Amino acid sequence: MSSENPTTNESLPAEPIAEPIKEQPAAIQLKTSILEETEESMVDWLGERGFPKYRAKQVLSWIYQRRVDNFQDMSDLPKSLRNELEAEFAIFTSKTQEAQHSEDGTEKLLIELADGGRIECVLLRDGPRRSICVSSQVGCAMGCVFCASGLDGVDRNLTRGEIVEQMLRLQRLLDPEERLSHIVMMGMGEPLANLPRVLEALEIAKDGEIGLGISPRRITISTVGLPPAIDRLAESNSPYQLAISLHAPYDELRTRLVPVNNKIGIVPLMEAADRYFNATGRRLTFEYVLLKDLNDSPACAEQLVKLLRRKTAMLNVIPYNPVPGLPYETPAPESIHEFRKILMEGGINVMFRQRKGNDIQAACGQLRRLREKEPHLVSFQKQRSSPLE
Ligand code: SF4
């Protein structure tokens, strides 16, 4: 899971972590990913080869809506076009290295990118909901102490196609009559540090004509809270929901849990959140991972009430999902109950989210870390996993 932090500070660069990050895979691929193409660029490509532009919609809707994984299966296209598409493009450029299935219906994929980078994405089944959690970077620079994704820093930003490819791989886990209903950009990485590519990928997610057709009200960008990027998101008029990972109600504790808070601070973060709300009118969500004996005290709950009580906001509290190798624990049920009671009596609009995928490594970055650092543990875990490729 993602979590994040902070706010604005004079000393914080406008793009605090983007500069050293590579934008493109290092490996040279033989074929171009068609998921990097827009409808406009496909119209150009088709025009250069003498095909009518309406074919662009056909090709793309075969991939995004009709879930075809092979150009030769696009049965209403001329054979010559199918052959040219096959010669130039690949639909999938990554490999699913491992798939884990939870007893509660959660499925997690460890994906190896064309350049060898590894990312994770998750499908969550909850009643009629089919929600997916998608990564935006290889690794993460934010360094939240309880998160496996940030333990080794960030390697690079994902491309538009690599973000979309996660959505399609998870979509293809569904039964044919099922559709993806919700997306959270809450996997590995800080989405606001890769905002242009994230917004490009979400365009195809919300496109009802050729894309996945997911309502933007059901698409959430989750951030630790980088104020300059929050302002840019507001200015972009993007129709998505914003979730800010708070995790602590005061600076000293938040900086311990989310070190980037040291450069930002809670007050500037909340000011950026207010600007976002004023500019968009959309209710904010704050995320709070509840960690035993760290941020689960009645005093923390009372300070949270003071921080949030005048805001048009929802607070999501998520009891921590332990990560092997990290010393943090899930709070006791009594602490969770007391924490909830104080928030509700304080008038906070709060939801306690049920943890999903407890029997697999469903928290962000766990599976990737096991695969890279402790391959013998992965072998053991394969008792309940099924590699797809
Ligand atoms: S380290 Fe990165 S991926 Fe992990 S919780 Fe923090 S922001 Fe999210």
Image (cartoon, rainbow, N blue to C red):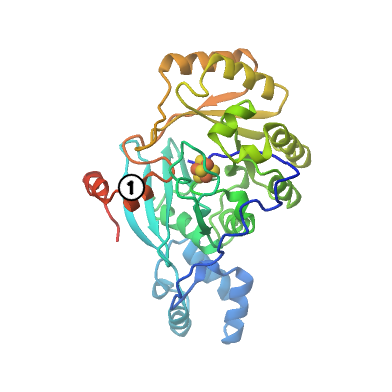
In the displayed structure, would residue 18 be above or below residue 282?
below
Instruction: Decide which of 222, 179 is in the foreground and name it.
Output: 222
Residue 183 visible (yes or no)? no
- Which residue is at a point 48% across and 41% down the rendered structure image? 1
For mark 1, what is the residue?
370
Tally the marks.
1
Q: Rate crowding at label 1 as few (under 14), some (14 to 19) or many (20 or more) other CA atoms within 10 Å.
A: some
Residue 309: x and y, percent?
Answer: 69, 21
SS at badge 1: helix
Q: Residue at x 73, y 52 (%)?
A: 236
Residue 307 % position (x, y): 68, 24
Mark 1, ligand 1, within 8 Å: the answer is: no
Judge whether residue 294 can be spotted in this image. yes
Residue 107 image-quadrant placement: top left
Vertical comparison of 56 with 48: above or below: above
Question: Front-most of 108 and 330?
Answer: 330
- Pick the front one: 257 or 237: 257
Residue 131 horizontal/vertical position (percent): 48, 43
* Image-based side of 146 in relation to 100, left or right: right
Task: Please tell me which residue is depicted at 45% across the width and 61% down the height of the picture.
Answer: 66
Estimate the x, y position of residue 304 in percent, counting from the top left: 63, 22
Residue at x 32%, y 46% (from the top left corner)? 100
Q: Amino acid at mark 1?
A: Leu
